[in-house]
Image (cartoon, rainbow, N blue to C red):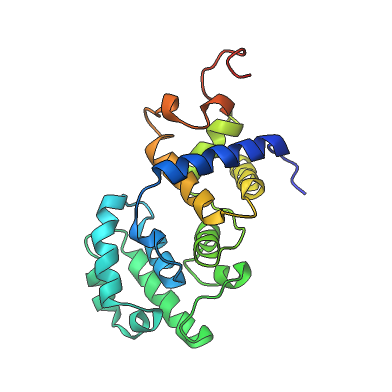
Amino acid sequence: MSTFPLPPPHARRRFRRSLLAWYRANGRSLPWRTTDDPYHILVSEVMLQQTQVDRVLPKYLEWLTKYPSLRALADAPEDDVTATWRPLGYNIRPRRLHAIARESVSRFEGRLPSDEQTLLSFKGIGAYTAGAIRSFAFGQRAAILDTNVARVLFRVFIGRGDPKAHAMRRRLWATSEVLVPRKHVFDFNQGLMDLGALICTARKPQCPACPLSRMCSSYPWTPGDRA
């Protein structure tokens, strides 16, 4: 059981309702949101690491045309794989994808497993990516915590302290885990990411447009306004 103060049940319910309603009206239309193929989800998540969506979109489509499955990627020469990746940068990422593909072929007949511990056994799949695969591909109740999600949760529920501190990171993971609903996990986690990317941005957040502003610890309401 967590030793951190976590959002009480009523705050969790309010957060979920507000976020889901906002996402269904404002969520971005992205090609990896129209599939539950674990490989496609993996490719999108690895490409989106430290890379903006508009740069990823054409490369994602090109990649899946050239390597439509984990087996096709595993069979490709590594030099070809890294050349196809350009110009996204951070070239350790295509090599990690290639290694994951080869391991999935050798261990799991070219498929990604759905359980957390086995996913984490792959070099290159960490807690966030495992959570994304489980929730987006398999519909499991799995938490995620990337930069955007951490920023949203820190501002809404905590508001003070160093969001990059190790203890704070553990608290943010615990917060993400208790917030995940039992239903609509896909929409909830995608909504968290979109809210951080579009509204609760690192600089100049659009607080008046945020569906969570009235429960946000960082929003400059007066005490009377918070009621």
Q: Where is residue 112 in the image (x, y as percent from the top left)?
A: 50, 76
Q: Nearer the viewer, residue 4 or 164?
A: 4
Q: Where is residue 118 in the image (x, y as percent from the top left)?
A: 59, 73
Q: Is residue 191 above or below residue 113?
A: above
Q: Position of residue 83 (x, y in %)?
A: 22, 71
Left or right: where 90 falls relative to 100: left
Left or right: where 138 falls relative to 196: right
Residue 88 in view = no
Q: Is residue 160 above or below residue 12?
A: above
Report the number of discs: 0
Name the residue rendered at 67%, 47% in the picture.
178
Name the residue rendered at 42%, 42% in the picture.
25
Q: Is residue 51 above or below residue 46?
A: above
Q: In this view, does 65 lie above or below 6?
A: below
Residue 125 in view = yes
Residue 101, quarter of the rendered image = bottom left
Name the residue rendered at 44%, 40% in the picture.
196
**Quadrant position of the C terminus in the picture:** top right
Residue 93, quarter of the rendered image = bottom left
In the orientation shown, which residue stands out farthest toward the right? 1
Name the residue rendered at 50%, 41% in the picture.
21
Q: Nearer the viewer, residue 214 or 58?
A: 214
Q: Which of 200 and 74 is in front in this view?
A: 200
